[in-house]
């Protein structure tokens, strides 16, 4: 599994993280199954996006 560090955007209050996991791999068929999760959150409260 791979994971990015917490990354920021132009808005300093919005952060995101990307996680990638390989579920299966077939060398014979030259295929892989992967799951990608993207997490986005605010670091301040009282505002809506």
Image (cartoon, rainbow, N blue to C red):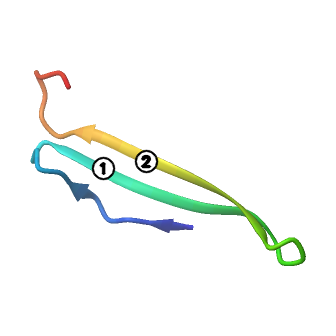
Q: Are marks 1 and 2 in contact (CB under 8 Å)?
A: yes
Q: Against 38, is 19 above or below?
A: below
Q: Position of residue 27 (x, y in %)?
A: 84, 78
Figure quadrant of the C terminus:
top left
Secondary structure under the numbered disc 1 in the rendered image:
strand
State the residue at coordinates (12%, 42%): 13
Total numbered labels: 2
Say which residue label 2 marks. 38
- Of the image marks 1 and 2, the number of the one nearer the N terminus: 1
Residue at 32% over, 65% down: 5
Q: Residue at x 13, y 28 (%)?
A: 45
Query: How much space separates mark 1 and mark 2, taking CA atoms?
Result: 7 Å
- Residue 14, given in percent of the width and then of the height, sits at 19, 43
Question: What x and y, as percent, mark residue 15?
Answer: 23, 48
Answer with left or right where residue 48 lies relative to residue 28.
left
Q: Which residue is mark 1?
A: 16
Q: Position of residue 33 (x, y in %)?
A: 72, 59
């Amino acid at each position: 599994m791979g994971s990015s560090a917490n990354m920021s955007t132009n808005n300093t209050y919005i952060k995101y993280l990307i996680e990638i996991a390989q579920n299966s791999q077939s060398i014979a068929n030259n295929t892989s199954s992967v799951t990608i999760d993207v997490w986005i959150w605010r670091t301040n409260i009282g505002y809506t996006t």
